Image (cartoon, rainbow, N blue to C red):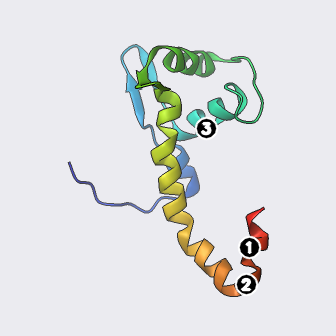
């Protein structure tokens, strides 16, 4: 199935629900990122604080693609979308700063 690209604001993008499971509410991109960062240890490991966190823990523990938890696997295409969407910004910065653009990498 082919789809046409859409322009979304940051908030609209973060509200997209890319994962749906029976008996589990649909999960937004923002919830997936927050869960990976604040529960699974991307930034720091924490404990589930609400129903959404508990549902994502269940999804993370139960559903896999190969050796990867689907809750992390779905972050790969999300990252590709973010990189593609921010490419014009990267190019503008590189153009403006020229040879010094590498200083912005860290």
| Rendered location of residue 72, percent (x, y) | 53, 32
Distance in Å between CA atoms under marks 1 and 2: 7 Å
| Residue 54 against residue 81 in the figure, above or below | above
Q: Residue at x 57, y 51 (%)?
A: 11
Q: Residue at x 64, y 85 (%)?
A: 95
Residue 1, disc: none
Locate residue 43: give its quadrant.
top right
- Is label 1 in a helix, a strand or a loop? helix
Residue depth check, mark 3 versus mark 1: number of the one nearer the observer: 1
Mark 3 vs 2, N-terminal side: 3
Instruction: Return the residue nearer the eye: 68 or 84.
Output: 68
- Is label 3 in a helix, a strand or a loop? helix
| Residue 74 against residue 45 in the figure, above or below | below
- Per the image, the residue denoted by label 1 is 102
Residue depth check, mark 3 versus mark 2: number of the one nearer the observer: 2
Distance in Å between CA atoms under marks 3 and 2: 33 Å
* Left or right of 15 in this view: 105: right
| Rendered location of residue 24, percent (x, y) | 44, 17
Question: Can you say which quadrant of the picture contains the C terminus?
Answer: bottom right
Q: Residue at x 58, y 17 (%)?
A: 57
| Residue 40 against residue 34 in the figure, above or below | above
- Is label 2 in a helix, a strand or a loop? helix
* Left or right of 52 in this view: 103: right
Classify mark 3: residues with Cα within 10 Å, few (<14), some (14-19) or many (20+).
some
Residue 99, disc: 2
Contact flag, marks 1 and 2 (Cβ < 8 Å)? yes
Distance in Å between CA atoms under marks 3 and 1: 27 Å
Classify mark 1: residues with Cα within 10 Å, few (<14), some (14-19) or many (20+).
few
Instruction: Return the residue nearer the eye: 78 or 106.
Output: 106
- Per the image, the residue denoted by label 3 is 33
């Amino acid at each position: 199935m082919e789809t046409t690209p859409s322009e979304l604001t940051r908030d609209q993008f973060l509200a997209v629900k890319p994962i749906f499971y029976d008996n589990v509410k649909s999960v937004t991109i923002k919830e997936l990122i927050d869960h990976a960062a604040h529960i699974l240890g991307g930034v720091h490991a924490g404990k589930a604080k609400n129903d959404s966190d508990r549902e994502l823990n269940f999804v993370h523990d139960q559903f896999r693609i190969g050796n990867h938890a689907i809750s992390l696997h779905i972050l790969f295409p999300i990252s590709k979308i973010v990189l593609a969407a921010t490419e014009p910004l990267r190019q503008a910065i590189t153009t403006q700063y020229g040879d010094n653009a590498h200083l912005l990498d860290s």
